[in-house]
Amino acid sequence: MKYSIKYSTLLFRVSLLCFLMIFSITNTYAQYTIKGTIISDTIESKILANNKIDLDTKRNIKIYLPPGYSQSKNKYPVVYYLHSLFENPNHIVSDHKTPEIIDKSISENRSKEFIFVVADFTSPTIGSFFENSSTSGHWLDFISKELVAYIDQNYRTIPDKSSRAVIGHFMGGRGALAVGMQYPNIFSVVYALHPVATGSGYLPRVSLDIDWQKIHAAKSYEDINENVMAKIFTGVCQAFLPNSNRPPLYCDFLFEKDENGTLKLNPKNVRKEQKGFHLDERLDEYADNLRNLKAIAFDWARFDQTQAHVISNRRFSKKLMDIGVEHIGEEFVGDPWNKYWGEDGRIAKRVLPFLNEHLKF
């Protein structure tokens, strides 16, 4: 009986000790995974002052500093994230909980530490199409010349292209590829998540359901604010068909009025827009730049309701292969929004390991 009591007491003590050890380890792990710090900053842009849509030149920035940043004097690589239309930095940081995804990856030793930057690409209209435009703003120059310089000057970065990556989702994915194509001297690694406008898909411009009559009748941008397709393609025209002498929208259009006032497709404008907007139209021009990047990857969701995006990404991957640009192009089962975020999402399982492999730390 005494032996049984002693054994039971010993077993209880061992169990309690194990519980306390597990609790301590878990608590320590939990504390570690929240050590990354989010700070808010602003940059006053001189480049974005040249526009016709009243852009706010003071741009907000959300910056993730890794767990070791405050405890060391180390310098870190930087990953720049380009958000899509209808989004802002808070969506990426708070709604999608990207910092928590990064923290978990670092704590599990699947990723080394890096700085993560999300600037504000919103506008009074629809947001950035990641192009240089006299109407809607010189966004590519802002990213490559002002934003990167500001981050390097104010944070402990490794100020070299080998330690910079640009990534983005949807229209931001297009932006990431466009930045990589034009600025391989600034960035070395690119990952685009379900990029759009990599090609023309299969629908001709004349078949798109766009109320051009409403657009032409608009006295201000607010007159088309309730029509999503009108907003998007007005933004496209402002980015790729800018005309500073044509108020109130300061752009030319894919459909123009003839001498009788009838709206008709303008083939010249369509070709100019496509050559600017669709990335496959620029491959010959920027082939050498793409080959100079260290690593390129992009993926796309099979069940995008706009199948033109799927078709265009498949063709874009093939065209990259035809001009000798090594890359990863991956189609996955899902839609453009439901597989990227979360602990088991593609950012955690695909993007972060890709960055960890190719960035210089």
Image (cartoon, grey):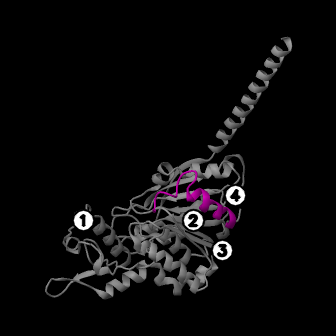
In the rendered view, tell whether residue 15 sits above or below residue 329. above
Q: Is residue 215 left or right of residue 186?
A: left
**Residue displayed at 52% across by 87% down:** 284
Query: Can residue 69 be seen by looking at this rendering?
Result: yes
Membership of 353 in magenta stretch: yes
> How far is mark 1 from mark 3, CA to CA?
42 Å
Three-letter code for the amino acid on which mark 3 is drawn: Lys
Count residues near mark 3 (Cα–Cα under 10 Å), then give few for <14, some for 14-19, many for 20+.
some
Q: Position of residue 53 (x, y in %)?
A: 33, 67
> How far is mark 4 from mark 3, CA to CA?
21 Å
Look at the image and give the residue range highlighted in magenta: 335-358
**Residue occupying the far top of the picture:** 1
2 and 3 marks in contact (CB < 8 Å) = no
Count residues near mark 1 (Cα–Cα under 10 Å), then give few for <14, some for 14-19, many for 20+.
many
Query: Can residue 253 be seen by looking at this rendering?
Result: no
Badge 4 is on which residue?
75
4 and 2 marks in contact (CB < 8 Å) = no
Disc 4 vs disc 1: which is toward the camera? Answer: 1
**Residue displayed at 36% across by 73% down:** 236
Three-letter code for the amino acid on which mark 1 is drawn: Ile
Count residues near mark 2 (Cα–Cα under 10 Å), then give few for <14, some for 14-19, many for 20+.
some
